[in-house]
Image: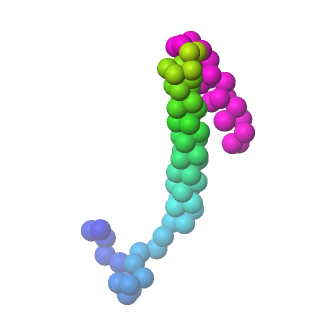
């Protein structure tokens, strides 16, 4: 912001599009994998608390679903 840029104000400064694309790709990957892990966690919690699987059963379901989700999303 403190830099002086020549040219019209409407066009602004030059953009680093490669950096923008890397940031966008990282955001999309984090959203995709984060959503998959949260869905696996919700299913594991439902199985553990309401399905009678218990803590270790729910944890095992979480691990299996997380591994399958990460494998399928690649």
Seen in the picture, residue 74 relative to 22 is either above or below; the reply is above
The region drawn magenta spans 54-74
The secondary structure that most of the magenta stretch takes on is helix
Report the quarter where the N terminus lies. bottom left
The residue lying at 35 percent from left, 78 percent from top is: 5
26 or 74: nearer the eye?
74
- Residue 28 in the image: state x and y as whole percent: 56, 52
Q: Quadrant of the C terminus?
A: top right
Above or below: residue 10 compared with residue 41: below
The vertical placement of 46 against 22, above or below, is: above
Residue ID at (65%, 29%) = 65
- Residue 60, visible in the rendered structure: yes
Quarter of the image holding residue 12? bottom left
Query: In which quarter of the view is residue 47 placed?
Result: top right
Which residue is most to the left?
2
Residue 59 visible in the snapshot: no
Where does residue 26 sit, x and y in percent of width and height?
55, 49
Q: Is residue 45 magenta?
A: no
Q: Position of residue 50 (x, y in %)?
A: 52, 22
Inspect the magenta stretch and tell me whether residue 64 lies in it.
yes
The quadrant in which residue 68 appears is top right
- Name which residue lies at 41% across and 75% down: 13
């Amino acid at each position: 912001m403190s830099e002086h840029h020549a040219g019209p104000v409407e066009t602004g400064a030059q953009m680093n599009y490669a950096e923008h694309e890397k940031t966008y790709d990282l955001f999309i990957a984090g959203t995709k994998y984060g959503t998959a892990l949260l869905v696996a966690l919700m299913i594991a919690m439902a199985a553990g608390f309401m399905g009678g699987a218990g803590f270790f059963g729910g944890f095992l379901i979480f691990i299996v679903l997380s591994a399958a989700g990460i494998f399928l999303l690649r």
